[in-house]
Image (cartoon, grey):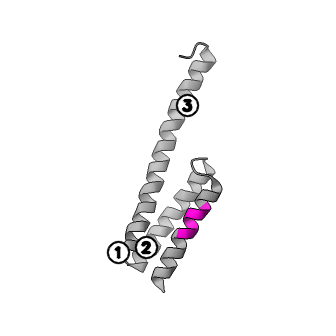
Amino acid sequence: MANTSSAKKAVRKIARRTAVNKSRRSEMRTYVRKVEEAIAGKDPKIAAAALREAEPLVARAAQKGILHKNTAARKISRLTKRVKALAS
């Protein structure tokens, strides 16, 4: 248990930040899942639209420290490659 007032405040801040990060991570995963489902459904237009929505969320997650920047870049790259393969 935190003893000093600064440690107590740190615990409060961590709890708030954890909630925000959890929400952002969940939202990002939802949009990535939508892209995956569109790819599985073999519809290039829907997949491309889903990717356009998901890409900024993945990039923002990296910016906010929820994902490592290389992980985000890799996710975006792989999804884009799969969507392009579907279109051709």
Q: Considering only order in the chain, which callout, 2 or 3, is on the residue closer to the N terminus?
A: 3
Tell me residue 58's x, y (percent).
54, 58
Helix, strand or loop status at disc 2: helix
- Please determine whether, in this image, residue 51 is positioned above or below residue 14: below
Identify the magenta region: 73-78
Relative to 78, is 1 above or below? above
Q: Which residue is mark 3?
A: 14
Q: Classify residue 17 as left or right of residue 38.
A: right
Q: Is residue 77 magenta?
A: yes
* Residue hosting label 2: 47
Are the residues tagged 2 and 1 within 8 Å (C-beta)? Answer: yes
Q: Residue furthest bottom?
A: 88
Q: Residues within 10 Å of mark 3 (few under 14, many from 20)?
A: few
- Residue placed under numbered mark 1 in the picture: 41
**Please, what secondary structure does the residue beneath circle 1 have?**
loop
- Mark 1: few/some/many CA within 10 Å (<14, 14-19, 20+): few
Three-letter code for the amino acid on which mark 2 is drawn: Ala
Name the residue at the top extreme: 3
Q: What residue is shown at x 60% (from left), y 57% (from top)? A: 71
Residues at marks 2 and 1, CA–CA distance in whole angstroms = 9 Å
The residue tagged with tag 3: helix, strand or loop? helix
Q: Which mark is residue 18?
A: none
For the residue marked with disc 3, what is the amino acid? Ile
Q: Amino acid at mark 1?
A: Gly
Observer-nearest of 56 and 62 = 62
